[in-house]
Image: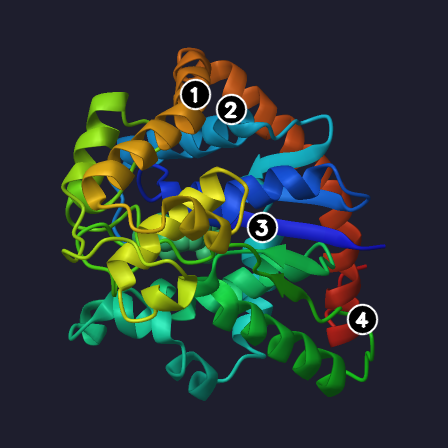
């Protein structure tokens, strides 16, 4: 049976990129036939330094973002990764399957490490192998993610194939498909249209946070970098205008339409018209979610209980798969 797995790192506050590229897709998938498992991937967050109090807060905030956006613990399994020890165990086994050369080709490590690769944690370098474990621990077949995670899902397929081949276990691990659809699979930084919007980015002005209030959202879009030209009358006209295209894509994703339809509606409009319309739309969509997040965050114990209950269900699926993996590899467990 098809099974969906995805996750978000509690490495900061949730952004509009996380919402449009991931959470919104999670909610849509929840109401399909597929079984859905959504994780707060705390073990991934600590690949870069996290102040312990911040990690605690961000873990609950990602969970609150899931719930406030419409993920329902009765329909989806919602939990935080570190509660299910199988992630770390299978992650280790996959560290022994994946090759150093494969990791060297991961563009995200290069982007995050910059010129300082030697100073990064070993965990940051190996993290795609833990991500493969997250997915394959549940034999998940579909992984809704933003464009930036495509290479890691492909690596997951390579790890699954190599394991199946090396241990003559054809078909044991499925080869999961990345699900990357719609107009906002890569929401860009509001100050630099060549970089993606990230929750760990340096400046708060480069991103919309899911908890930003109406004034902040309006201000950030008003100050968003753009070129001086008006909107063109067809989407092709945005080809070499990354900042302009980003704002049109965000508008399309927020209003559940296509970028082409947005261009048709706003052909010839200037930024003085488009930016306030975009800000109003974003406030319309995000305000009810951030209000609900604030309500949920007022009772952290309830969030923790939800995550604990989800972890119990996750463990039930994971344990037989992990156990079978150890058997296939010849570990003495009995
Ligand atoms: P960090 O800066 O700590 O890496 P992040 O904002 O990139 O944070 P992640 O936890 O790494 O968030 O990613 C969670 C999910 O959100 C992934 O599926 C990722 O592809 C998606 N995502 C992150 N940023 C964007 C974006 N700008 N546009 C679309 N999807 C995004
Ligand atoms: Mg990221």
Q: Residues within 10 Å of mark 2 (few under 14, many from 20)?
A: some
Tell whether circle 3 marks a residue whose Cβ is less than 8 angstroms from ligand 1: yes
Residue that numbered label 3 is attached to: 6
| Identity of the residue drawn at 81% across and 78% down | 169
Q: Is residue 310 above or below residue 315?
A: above
Q: Between 91 and 79, which is closer to the camera in this rendering?
A: 79
| Identity of the residue drawn at 62% across and 52% down | 86
First in residue order: circle 2 vs circle 1: 2
The CA span between labels 2 and 1 is 6 Å
Q: Is residue 46 above or below residue 276?
A: below
First in residue order: circle 1 vs circle 3: 3
Give the label, 3 or 4, closer to the camera: 3
Give the label, 1 or 4, closer to the camera: 1
First in residue order: circle 4 vs circle 2: 2
Residue that numbered label 4 is attached to: 172
From the top left corner, tell me how far across and down residue 222 is, in percent.
17, 38
**Figure label count:** 4
User: Mark 2 and mark 4 in contact (Cβ < 8 Å)?
Assistant: no
User: Mark 4 and mark 3 in contact (Cβ < 8 Å)?
Assistant: no
From the top left corner, tell me how far across and down residue 131 is, in percent.
53, 61
Q: Circle 3 sits in a helix, a strand or a loop, which is it? A: strand
Tell whether circle 1 marks a residue whose Cβ is less than 8 angstroms from ligand 1: no
The CA span between labels 1 and 3 is 20 Å
User: Mark 1 and mark 2 in contact (Cβ < 8 Å)?
Assistant: yes
Q: Is residue 313 left or right of residue 270?
A: right
The CA span between labels 4 and 2 is 36 Å
Quadrant of the frame with the N terminus = bottom right
Residue that numbered label 1 is attached to: 293
First in residue order: circle 2 vs circle 3: 3
Residue that numbered label 2 is attached to: 68
Tell whether circle 2 marks a residue whose Cβ is less than 8 angstroms from ligand 1: no
């Amino acid at each position: 049976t098809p099974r969906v797995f995805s996750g978000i790192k509690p490495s900061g506050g949730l952004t509009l990129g996380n919402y449009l590229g991931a959470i919104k897709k999670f909610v849509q998938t929840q109401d399909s036939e597929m079984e859905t498992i959504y994780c707060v991937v705390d073990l991934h967050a600590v690949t870069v330094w996290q102040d312990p109090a911040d990690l605690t807060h961000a873990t609950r905030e990602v969970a609150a973002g899931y719930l406030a956006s419409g993920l329902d613990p009765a329909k989806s399994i919602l939990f935080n990764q570190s509660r299910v020890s199988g992630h770390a165990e299978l992650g280790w086994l996959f560290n022994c399957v994946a090759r150093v050369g494969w990791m060297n080709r991961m563009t995200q490590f290069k982007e995050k490490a910059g010129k300082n690769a030697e100073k990064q944690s070993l965990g940051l370098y190996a993290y795609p192998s833990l991500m493969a474990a997250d997915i394959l621990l549940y034999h998940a077949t579909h992984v809704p993610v933003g464009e930036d995670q495509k290479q890691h899902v492909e690596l997951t397929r390579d790890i699954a194939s190599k394991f199946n081949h090396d241990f003559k276990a054809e078909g044991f691990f499925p080869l999961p498909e990345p699900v990357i659809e719609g107009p906002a699979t890569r929401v860009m930084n509001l100050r630099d249209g060549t970089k993606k919007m990230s929750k760990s980015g340096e400046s708060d002005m480069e991103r919309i946070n899911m908890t930003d209030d109406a004034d902040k959202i309006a201000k950030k879009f008003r100050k968003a970098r753009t070129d001086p030209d008006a909107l063109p009358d067809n989407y092709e006209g945005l080809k070499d205008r990354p900042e302009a295209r980003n704002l049109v894509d965000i508008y399309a994703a927020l209003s559940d339409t296509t970028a082409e339809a947005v261009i048709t509606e706003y052909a010839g409009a200037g930024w003085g018209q488009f930016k306030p319309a975009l800000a109003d739309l974003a406030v319309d969509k995000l305000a009810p979610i951030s209000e609900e997040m604030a309500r949920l965050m007022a009772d952290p114990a309830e969030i923790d209980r939800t995550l604990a209950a989800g972890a119990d269900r996750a463990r039930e699926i994971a344990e037989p798969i992990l156990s079978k993996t150890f058997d296939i590899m010849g570990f003495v467990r009995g």
